[in-house]
Image (tube, grey):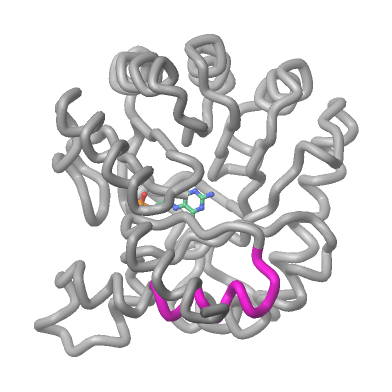
Amino acid sequence: MGVLNVTPDSFSDGGEFFSFDAAISRAEQMRQDGAEIIDVGGESTRPGAQRISEETEIERVMPVITELAKRDFFLSVDTMRASVATAALSAGARMVNDVSGGRADDAMFEVVAKAGVPYVLTHWRAPSASMDSFANYEDVTGQVLNETNAQVARAKQAGVLVSQLVIDPGFGFAKDVAQNWQLLRDLSALVAIGLPLLIGVSRKRFVASLLPAEQQSDNGLKDLAGAAIAALAVTKGVWGVRTHDPAGVRRAIKSLRP
Ligand code: PMM
């Protein structure tokens, strides 16, 4: 899954693909590099980010989704809002990626159930502006498992089919550096839930923390680490990897089965 952030302020690529033309050519490049899904997002969820309005989010993603759908991309929309999901699906998106796992908008499960599309349900505790203060766990893996299972049950109750569900432990969302590494070590426990598992580690703070301070903003170095993590995750049975660097991830995964 290639990341296309149509935002001025995302964590690692804020502003880079904000213009329509830059977004379209980035999507084409990622498809060529092996991305099978392009994940279009209009709202930054970087740590500390403030929410934007629904109108702004729709204005950002709709032209890009409309154009990429015409070019027959398989698109997911990265949004926490049911209204944005609805608009994106009507414009040709075929999947909903909700980093809040249905917790930010009560109407989300209903929209997804009605549309019948794949839905990424991510572990999440609070909006980005305050999430760091929710990184309190006694047993991060156990609690992420429990909280994910609880949201899965709510989704099913609202009519979402098991066959629509993909789960994601939400690396970086209300987790500190050590908790993210712990979750990664315990990926097998998440895979054992039995639903397809997506991970997004690309360019995140805990990955950067591997590097000396002066190199932590170097996307190339973070992408190398991200590709290694992706390959490791594939050996543990993940279904998908959300990445800013589909070329590197593809290469790393291919090297497992030359
Ligand atoms: N991370 C970000 C945004 N969307 N979606 C899923 N399913 N999983 C993630 O881990 C995830 C996501 C934040 O990363 P970005 O600002 O680099 O896009």
Q: Does 156 sit left or right of 110 as displayed?
A: right
Q: Against 90, is 127 above or below?
A: below
Whether residue 58 can be seen here:
no
Image coordinates for residue 4, horizontal then vertical, percent: 33, 40
Image coordinates for residue 229, horizontal then vertical, percent: 47, 78
> Given the current orientation, which residue lies at the most extreme front position?
258
Q: Does 217 sit left or right of 125 as displayed?
A: left
Q: 90 or 46, which lies in front?
A: 90
Residue 63, quarter of picture: top left
* Residue name at image x 62 percent, y 61 percent: 169
Q: Does 105 sit left or right of 155 as displayed?
A: left
Q: Give the range drawn in magenta.
A: 227-238
Q: Does 220 sit left or right of 182 as displayed?
A: left
Residue 137, quarter of picture: bottom right
* Residue name at image x 56 percent, y 17 percent: 89
* Residue name at image x 55 percent, y 61 percent: 199
Whether residue 24 can be seen here:
yes
Residue 64, quarter of picture: top left
Q: Against 153, is 156 above or below?
A: above
* Residue name at image x 15 percent, y 72 percent: 218
Q: Against 116, is 173 above or below?
A: below
Q: How many labels does the image show?
A: 0
Give yes or no for residue 46 being in the magenta stretch. no
Image coordinates for residue 161, horizontal then vertical, percent: 86, 34
Image coordinates for residue 88, horizontal then vertical, percent: 49, 18
Q: 205 or 40, which lies in front?
A: 40
Q: Against 75, is 210 above or below?
A: below
Q: 141 or 62, which lies in front?
A: 62
